[in-house]
Image (tube, helix red, strand yellow):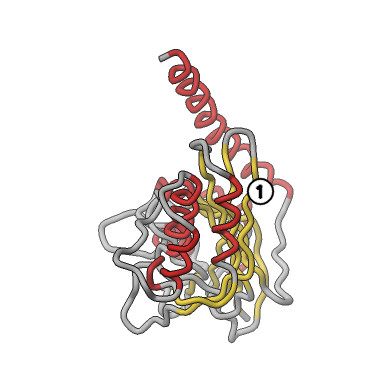
Amino acid sequence: MKLALRVAYDGTAFYGFQRQPGVRTVEGELIRVLKKLKIIESPEENDFKGASRTDRGVSAFFNVVSFAPGERPDLARPEVLNHHLQDIWVLGVAEVPDEFHPRFWARAKTYRYYLVDEGFDIERVIECAGLFEGVHDFSAFAKLEPGRDPVREITEVRVILRNGYYVVEITGRSFLWEMVRRIVNALRFCGLGLMESREVEEMLGGNYPRKIPPAPPEGLVLWHIEYAGVEFRTDEKGLKKTKRDLFERYSRALTRAALFGDVLLEL
């Protein structure tokens, strides 16, 4: 038997998801707490795996890790783990088959990017967004890694209008490094009239003199991962603490944003 944890985290508090020596990462913190509680002995012995290696500054509302529990599987509960974690919240736990791998078993991933409205031509943004749906070579919209196929399928790109900002929601089976953030910047450039849809089509066709730079990581959230037959259980006590922590953290950010918005209006 393996266990899978659904985790959320504030990416601005970490140097990315993947563990690295000498810096604070999401994976490193989870492993530290799991070892401290004797839920695992080590990531190697207990087959610790993660679904998505989000970059530095990128947050998640739904990432997943799995492991074969060791001496104290009874402590792998949200209310226990959240007591020992900071900037990370365990939102659910599920029993999964021994062969489960959180990355390879994922049927779809959805990312959300929160984009401040800079006066975009929304019709241009939506037209550009539609070009990314389907199967394409995303070499012009990613930081390529050796041996990784640049061809990916995007099943849906949605642009949702909110009060003063847009939510760009992108769903696909798998993504390349910086791919979502570079797509978002392409939408932004189209909305500002700095790029034409024709240029996006040419870049997806392999004709590009330069790549699109990535949008800042702080606006990106791994929003959801879809699995077949995996049900994450939570508890009300742990959920209340998580909601309280998130409210306190982001209400402060909202207050500062409102403050600076007023300052900009007065200038």
Q: Residue at x 70, y 57 (%)?
A: 234
* 263 and 76: which is toward the camera: 263
* 180 and 191: which is toward the camera: 191
User: Percent position (x, y) of residue 41?
Assistant: 44, 73
Above or below, 92 against 105 in this view is above
Secondary structure under tag 1 reads helix
* 244 and 170: which is toward the camera: 170
Q: Residue at x 52, y 29 (%)?
A: 252
Decide if residue 76 is in sight here.
no
Amino acid type at circle 1 is: Gly
User: Percent position (x, y) of residue 131?
Assistant: 56, 65
User: Percent position (x, y) of residue 33?
Assistant: 46, 58
Which quarter of the image is occupied by the C terminus?
top left
Above or below, 6 against 173 in this view is above
Q: Residue at x 39, y 65 (%)?
A: 18
Mark 1, residues whose alpha carbon is within 10 Å: few (<14), some, or many (≥20)? Answer: many
Location of residue 68 by image quarter: bottom right
Query: In this rendering, would 7 be left or right of 12?
Result: right
* 11 and 149: which is toward the camera: 149
Above or below, 164 against 65 in this view is above
Decide if residue 134 is in sight here.
yes
Which residue reaches farthest top?
266
Q: Residue at x 47, y 74 (%)?
A: 48
Label 1 sits on residue: 238
Query: In this rendering, would 78 be left or right of 35?
Result: right
Location of residue 81 by image quarter: bottom right
Which quarter of the image is occupied by the N terminus?
bottom right
